[in-house]
Image (cartoon, helix red, strand yellow):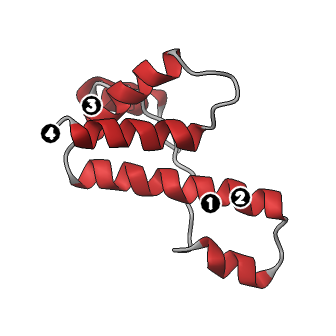
Amino acid sequence: MLKQEVFEKASMVFGVSVGIAHNITYTSVSEKRETKTETPETLKKLDDEVEINLIISKAIESGRYRDLQDKLWKMNKKRHGRTKEVTIYKNAWKEIRNDR
């Protein structure tokens, strides 16, 4: 477990909030679907988490992570109650890619 000071220092260095990621140990939800141990609701949530992780990975690889976090912050301020988190990530990533 990291100390609070490490989180604060990383937040200052990157200029964004830092949290703990949820580790997903498989590459596709279809692998999990085949085992039939999860409910459909859990699998749908898992699909969304995989999609969010993919967007974050693309942003990091392209050097646009900070831009993504800024856009997410702005979009979350205007967020409607029923808007899913994955939708906000998709829209933010789409806008960032179009800004180039």
Give above or below for 97 relative to 32. above
Residue extending farthest left: 100
Image quadrant holding the C terminus, namely top left
Residue extending farthest front: 98
Residue that carries the numbered disc 3 in the rendered image: 14
Residue extending farthest bottom: 34
In the image, which disc is placed on residue 100? 4
Residue 69 placement: quadrant? top left
Residue that carries the numbered disc 1 in the rendered image: 47
Pointer 1 with pointer 2, Cβ within 8 A: yes
Q: Is residue 93 visible?
A: yes
Image position, residue 28 (x, y; %) = 56, 74
Kind of residue at badge 3: Phe
CA gap, disc 4 to disc 3? Answer: 21 Å
Pointer 2 with pointer 3, Cβ within 8 A: no
Q: Earlier in the sequence, mark 4 or mark 3?
A: 3
Describe the element under mark 4 as helix, strand or loop.
loop
Instruction: State the residue at coordinates (73%, 84%).
Output: 34
Give above or below for 83 relative to 43. above
Q: Earlier in the sequence, mark 4 or mark 1?
A: 1
CA gap, disc 3 to disc 1? Answer: 28 Å
Describe the element under mark 3 as helix, strand or loop.
helix
Residue 17 placement: quadrant? top left
Instruction: State the residue at coordinates (71%, 58%).
Output: 44
Q: Is residue 5 visible?
A: no
Image position, residue 23 (x, y; %) = 55, 59
Describe the element under mark 1 as helix, strand or loop.
helix
Kind of residue at badge 4: Arg
CA gap, disc 2 to disc 3? Answer: 31 Å
Q: Residues within 10 Å of mark 4 (few under 14, many from 20)?
A: few
CA gap, disc 1 to disc 2? Answer: 5 Å
